[in-house]
Amino acid sequence: MRVIVLGAGVVGTTSAWYLARAGHEVTVIERQGAAGLETSFANGGQISTGHAEPWANPGAPAKIVEWLGREDAPLLFRMRADWRQWRWGLRFLVECLPSRTRDNMRQILALALYSRAALRELRRDTGIQYDQLTRGILQFFTDEAEFERASAQTALLRHYGAEREVKSAADCIAIEPALRHAADRIVGGLYAPGDESGDALKFTQALAQLAARAGARFLYGRSIKRLDAESGRVVGVVLADADGSDESMRADAYVVALGAYSPLVLRGLGIAIPVYPLKGYSITLALEPGDEAPTVSLSDDEHKLVFSRLGDRLRAAGTAELNGYNTAVNDLRCGAIVQRTFELFPGAGRPERAEFWTGLRPATPSNVPVIGRTRYPNLFLNTGHGTLGWTMACGSGRALADIVSGRQPEPDCRFLGLPPRARSVFVARPSAG
């Protein structure tokens, strides 16, 4: 089939790759001048399966109340006169119920494990390079109560297939010696030895080149104006070129992978999805010989930050802000990330050289992405991955290609337009790293 993919972020690009591998004639439309220049540009860099608990969990409401009024809060609801934001917030509270959290955790983990296995297979088959490290991810805690609560979840996550080990404070320092400057504050940690890290931008742009060699066509600098439908099917997409002239393209099938902007395009077709922009921040520090920075990817539970070594750079990312489609960089929030980074790693370069960035994550209240077929039989979605777009990208793209091709995807996750599967635990197939 001829398939048009809207969006060339990490999710759209992996979708294009797996669709092309499945034998489809693929065209990717992207408004930027290259792949991966929006939300995939400077994210936290983690391929994280061992820390699958969603933001919406039983402890979240109390935390949100505690953070009210703090401009540097890890999760900041900046209330707006926007009914979509309020509706999203109410659904978020529903997803905090224990039963909902458990089910969401199961689905997130199933897709994340499948995706990590797909990434390893892709890396083995193509030799793709993206400053990847396969040293696991360590989540460290500075609050005893939070550590005990998270440790209690370990048995449940293991039941669903996660590799997660409870570690003492001394173990944490042994796994990542750069944490020794915070040794007096760390009370313990959770270690996922099979998890990974890497530069999502480098991966996305390298995979776009591989997909192009496999026959996919990438059209950059085109904005999507609308999707047109007739007689219950999508019949075309109208684009705007850089000079403002309209262009219409047709295909047999269409995939919307526009991240946080997906709801805006779908609205014209009367399709509503529970995706709202969740602004995240990151800083990137250039490292020089002699600088001391972690090489094991880390998650700081108290501040909801992640740290990943990307070659000769350190990426620190996190926090979440519900503020509509506002993409302005808040220097105070970025400054808080800089401050925390150098509290933990005083030798990690020079703070004045930190590069600030912000991006809009496409968040669902449950953290479970929206993947599958819509009520238009030739319109498919691959969006809503929230903070786990990089983690779930390969699995989501592969599952989406299966759905478009009329096959049942492997992971035990809710897919649009498909009946729920019998409950199972996905076990990743061994593959070379």
Image (cartoon, helix red, strand yellow):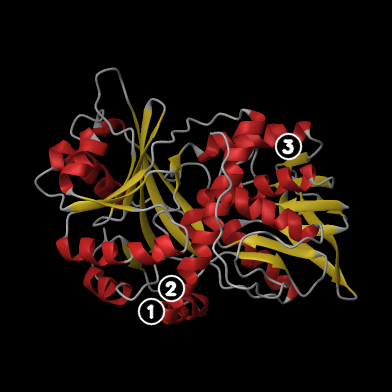
Q: In the image, 198: left or right of 260?
A: left
Circle 3: residue type: Ala
Q: Are marks 3 and 1 in contact (CB under 8 Å)?
A: no
Real-space CA distance between mark 3 and mark 1, rounded to the nearest whole angstrom:
41 Å
Label 2 packing within 10 angstroms: few (<14), some (14-19), many (20+): some
Query: SS at mark 2?
Result: helix
Residue 280 horizontal/vertical position (percent): 41, 54
Real-space CA distance between mark 2 and mark 3, rounded to the nearest whole angstrom:
36 Å
Residue 215 horizontal/vertical position (percent): 82, 36
Position of residue 85 relative to residue 167, above or below, is: below
Q: Which mark is residue 102?
A: 2
Q: Residue at x 48, y 76 (%)?
A: 88
The residue beneath circle 1 is 98
Q: Is residue 385 visible?
A: no
Residue 290 horizontal/vertical position (percent): 24, 19
Q: In the image, 111: left or right of 180?
A: right
Q: Identify which residue, 207 or 362, lies in the foreground.
A: 207
* Sequence-earlier tag: 2 or 3: 2
Mark 2 vs mark 3, foreground winner is: 2
Q: In the image, 333: left or right of 158?
A: left
Residue extending furthest toward the top: 289
Circle 1: residue type: Pro
Q: Residue at x 29, y 72 (%)?
A: 64
Residue 413 horizontal/vertical position (percent): 60, 66
Q: Are marks 1 and 2 in contact (CB under 8 Å)?
A: yes
Q: Which mark is residue 211?
A: 3
